[in-house]
Image: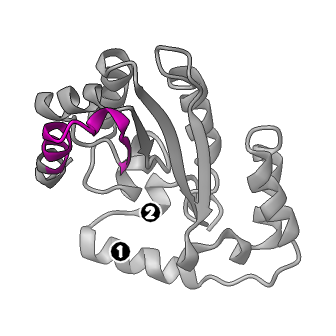
Amino acid sequence: MLNDDQVSLLEKLDEQGILSDVFISYNTNASIYPSDRLIDLWQRSRLVKLFLSIDAVEQAFEYIRWPAVWSAVEKNILRMKKELPSNVMFGFNITVGSYNIFEIKAVKQWIDQNLSCNREGDSSDFNWQIADNFDPKWLHKDIKQLAIMQLDGVVDSITAYLESYIEHSSSDHWIEMLDRIDFKRGTRWKKQLLIGNYY
């Protein structure tokens, strides 16, 4: 949403009379609301899918997506659901790491309460992938077991992933990376992320 290149491209497709056949997909953290011109072009397209990169909510979101502000992002998302054309569908693309393994339940609850579908009733997708340098397989076994208990019945595929690595050796290398991030930004992961309760 930060640049206008997409607008120029969609305008060219519209001028050629083929925009109505185009499926458009975005990955966004929802910190910027789409412009009126972009929304108008979306309405002329066949389908738009907005994948929202929301890895946590509230203060944990603000740590992970620093310097984004959760209240502003939440307001944008709820406004999108209410105001965007009916050919806009939603999805969530969650990055799962050691730092946010205890945030996932709140994310899923927020989605279920607020954006399980668009206003036409089309279900929102829920996708996730592992944050390579922060893979939760490196967590201590007892922490993985706690996460499994918390996520059981919430996101079973993440639970299954953790179970498959329950005996994997642990490492705290990811803590050093978070400490370096904190040093650069002046943040405190142990205060803003739930995982800080265990380390």
Q: Is residue 21 magenta?
A: yes
Q: Position of residue 105 (x, y in %)?
A: 65, 41
Query: Disc 1 marks which residue?
Result: 181
Would you place residue 67 above or below residue 154 in this image?
below
Would you place residue 122 above or below residue 108 in this image?
above
Q: Quadrant of the C terminus?
A: bottom right
Which segment is the magenta one? Answer: 9-28
Q: Is residue 138 magenta?
A: no
**159, 189: nearer the viewer:** 159
**18, 177: nearer the viewer:** 18
Q: Which mark is residue 189?
A: 2
Task: Give, as a three-letter code, the residue at label 2.
Answer: Trp
User: What residue is shown at x 56% (from left), y 61% (from top)?
Assistant: 196
Task: Give, as a three-letter code, the residue at label 1.
Answer: Ile
User: What residue is shown at x 38% (from left), y 63% (from top)?
Assistant: 188
Q: Position of residue 87 (x, y in %)?
A: 40, 24
Side (left or right) of 91 relative to 22:
right
* Marks 1,2: beta carbons within 8 A: yes
Provide the secondary structure element on which disc 2 rests.
Answer: helix
